[in-house]
């Protein structure tokens, strides 16, 4: 029995029973900073706080965003993992934490519910890595992220599951006054991948910069969604997606910008640039802007470009074979975004994964 279907990519989501999960690990720059189980949040939060996290209502215009109620309800009922990070003022600018979720033959079902809460005037770097897998492995995850006033969060989420994994993820981010978010959702793996993220810029002078990176190859199916909901004045929201699609893959990217009444002098931008490696690919971008305010700027752009023959010829004339020249051109579209990540080890790891995908 299936609990959801997605016509855009012709994908069915099976009804998977939950089971115990033991593939969670972490690294921290501080020995005294340990992520709590998400149960700590549910046991100590008020009913109003839990209600806000679980069942925050969407506006009429947002009702068609997200992965659907059934996916969220299934996660809540079957949750078997998740963390709670409360980043307080003892967290310095140089501190970081790396969270790892791994799938394998034993840990092949993951329902993870995660909460990140960044206090006022705090700057944090968090990396979350999903990897591994097995045939018919399954993950359904959710993130609730809150940035208090004047806080900054540099968030990197990497999904590099093996073939045969179904990956679902929903994210809700709330940004307060003068808070800043730099987010890098990197999608390299899984056979079916569906993600939806909604970022609420609730107060004035907030700044959001989201840089999705994706690589969809073989017969994989991917449906990505990013939504900016801007309510505060003088705010900036940017979604700048870059990726590569090859073989017989199917990819959809939906970018929504909501410039709501009261967000005067704010800017919302969405762009999706896909490099197309061959014929037979099904790739779509669906940009949407909703605007209720006059003194704002809303922009969207989408492009699907094959490798340029002139650039390919130029590199080959300099001694590179065709395969190497193609790799150089594809990597050139990824590297500007990867280089924004302020972690050398992580950058090199991502480049190695990109090389592996391109060599297949």
Image: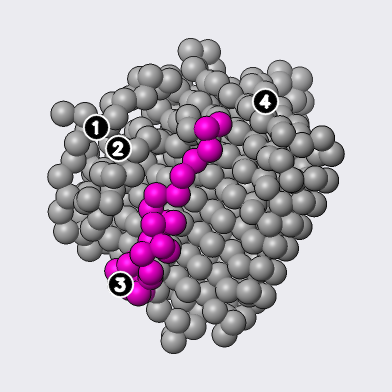
- Locate residue 87, reporting x and y percent: 52, 75
Considering every residue shown, the one lying at the far top of the view is 280
Query: Which quadrant would residue 164 be assigned to in this image?
Result: top left
Q: How far apart in space, not on screen, are marks 1 and 2 (Cα)?
A: 7 Å
Task: State which quarter of the image contains the C terminus.
Answer: top left
Residue tagged by mark 3? 43
Can you tell which of label 1 and label 2 is closer to the viewer? 2
Q: Secondary structure at mark 3?
A: helix
Lateral position of residue 305 relative to residue 12, left or right:
right
Identified at 69% across, 69% down, the residue is 150
Position of 69 compared to 93: left or right?
left
Instruction: Name the residue beneath numbered marker 2.
Output: 70
What SS does tag 2 mark?
helix
| Circle 1 crowding by C-alpha within 10 Å: few under 14, some 14–19, many from 20 | few
For label 1, the SS is strand
Q: Which mark is residue 3?
A: 1
Distance from disc 3 to disc 4, alpha carbons, whole Å, reads 44 Å
Question: CA gap, disc 1 to disc 3?
Answer: 29 Å
Could you say which quadrant of the image residue 5 lies in? top left
* Mark sitting earlier along the chain (2/4): 2
Q: Which residue is mark 4?
A: 302
Considering the numbered disc 4 on the image, is that residue within a helix, a strand or a loop? strand
Q: Nearer the viewer, mark 2 or mark 4?
A: 2
Which residue is located at x 71 percent, y 41 percent? Answer: 261
Q: Earlier in the sequence, mark 1 or mark 4?
A: 1
Mark 3 Cα-neighbour bin, 10 Å: few <14, some 14–19, many ≥20: few
- Color scheme of the displayed model: one colour
Q: Picture coordinates of residue 176 (x, y %)? A: 64, 61
Residue occupying image coordinates x 76% and y 57%: 205
Question: Which residues lie in the magenta part?
Answer: 36-61
Labels 1 and 3: the sequence-earlier one? 1
């Amino acid at each position: 029995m299936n609990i959801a279907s997605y016509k855009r990519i012709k994908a069915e989501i099976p009804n998977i029973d939950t089971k115990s999960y033991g593939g969670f690990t972490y690294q921290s720059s501080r020995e005294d900073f340990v992520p709590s189980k998400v149960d700590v949040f549910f046991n100590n939060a008020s009913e109003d706080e839990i209600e806000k996290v679980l069942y925050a209502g969407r506006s009429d215009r947002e009702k068609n965003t997200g992965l659907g109620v059934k996916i969220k309800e299934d996660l809540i009922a079957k949750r078997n993992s998740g963390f709670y990070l409360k980043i307080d003022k003892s967290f310095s600018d140089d501190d970081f934490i790396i969270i790892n979720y791994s799938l394998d033959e034993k840990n092949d079902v993951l329902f993870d519910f995660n909460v990140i809460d960044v206090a006022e005037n705090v700057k944090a770097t968090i990396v979350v890595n999903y990897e591994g897998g097995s045939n018919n492995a399954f993950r359904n995850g959710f993130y609730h992220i809150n940035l208090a006033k004047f806080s900054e969060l540099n968030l990197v989420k990497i999904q590099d599951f093996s073939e045969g994994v179904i990956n679902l993820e929903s994210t809700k981010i709330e940004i307060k006054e003068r808070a800043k978010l730099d987010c890098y959702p990197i999608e390299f793996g899984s056979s079916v991948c569906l993600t939806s993220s909604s970022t609420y810029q609730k107060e004035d002078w907030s700044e959001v910069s989201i840089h999705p990176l994706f690589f969809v190859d073989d017969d994989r199916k991917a449906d990505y969604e990013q939504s900016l909901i801007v309510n505060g004045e003088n705010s900036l929201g940017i979604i700048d997606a870059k990726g590569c699609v090859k073989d017989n893959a199917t990819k959809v990217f939906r970018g929504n910008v909501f410039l709501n009444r009261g967000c005067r002098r704010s800017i919302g931008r969405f762009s999706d640039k896909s490099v197309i490696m061959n014929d037979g690919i099904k790739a779509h971008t669906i940009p949407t802007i909703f605007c209720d305010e006059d003194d704002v700027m809303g922009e969207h752009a989408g492009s699907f470009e094959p490798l340029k023959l002139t650039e390919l010829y130029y590199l080959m004339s300099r001694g590179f074979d065709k395969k190497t020249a193609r790799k150089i051109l594809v990597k050139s579209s990824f590297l500007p975004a990867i280089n924004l990540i302020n972690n050398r080890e992580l950058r090199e790891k991502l480049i190695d994964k990109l090389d592996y995908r391109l060599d297949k």
